[in-house]
Amino acid sequence: MSRRISEKLTALTTEIRSFIARVILFNEKVGEAIGLNGTDLQCLHLLSLQGSATPGELAKWASLTTGGMTVVIDRLEKAGYVVRERNPLDRRSLIVRPVMPKLRKLEAIYRQKGEALNRVLSNFDDQELTLLFEFFRRINLSDQPED
């Protein structure tokens, strides 16, 4: 690897770490404002991206044990952010769904950050956006636990 490439990788890694730290700190503030801890808030984000999930699926996405996920779901349900419903495909299982009115209130908190992100992304052309998408897709796939 050339020195120039090595320096770019180091600089890129530094920017990514800074971005992640800022996102985590922002999410901690949001969680504190609405009475959720960081893990519960991130699990709610994962659930809202999918629309619904079994507790086992959610545990896998969040890299938590099923017992740990049960505790998270209990807290989210108590706070009014999710409901448990019978799984129509497996009566021994449950489906966890976000409560949309509560989720819309949460989305309003994130709207300003989303608009800022869209302003930055709108400066990239189609090829650059494809590259960014592929980068994040690969990162997200590489972080998935093995079955």
Image: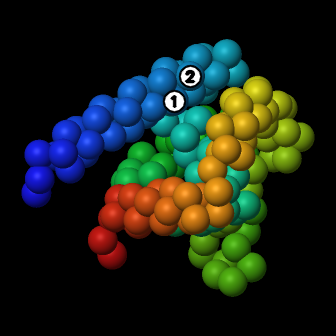
Q: Give me the residue at 37% from left, 33% from top.
A: 15
Near-viewer residue (117 or 95): 117
- Quarter of the image with the C terminus in it: bottom left
x and y, in percent, of residue 93 in the image: 60, 71
x and y, in percent, of residue 7 in the image: 19, 40
Q: Is residue 45 above or below residue 29?
A: below
Residue 31, image quadrant: top right
x and y, in percent, of residue 100 in the image: 85, 47
**Residue found farthest to the right:** 101
Q: Is residue 100 above or below residue 115?
A: below
Near-viewer residue (110 or 105): 110
Q: Circle 2 — which element?
A: helix
Q: Is residue 26 visible?
A: yes
Q: Is residue 65 above or below residue 105?
A: below
Q: Give me the residue at 55% from left, 58% from top.
A: 128
Q: Are marks 1 and 2 in contact (CB under 8 Å)?
A: yes
Residue 82 placement, left or right of 129: right
Give the crowd class for mark 1: few <14, some 14-19, many >=20 residues within 10 Å: few
Q: Circle 1 — which element?
A: helix
Q: Give me the residue at 71% from left, 31% from top.
A: 116
Residue type at mark 1?
Answer: Val
**Residue found farthest to the bottom:** 89
Residue hosting label 1: 23
Give the crowd class for mark 2: few <14, some 14-19, many >=20 residues within 10 Å: some
- Quarter of the image with the N terminus in it: bottom left
Residue type at mark 2?
Answer: Phe
Q: Give me the residue at 56% from left, 22% from top.
A: 26
Q: Is residue 13 visible?
A: no
Residue 114, image quadrant: top right
x and y, in percent, of residue 49 in the image: 67, 56
- Number of the label disc, if any, that sits on residue 26: 2
Q: CA distance from mark 1 to mark 2?
A: 5 Å
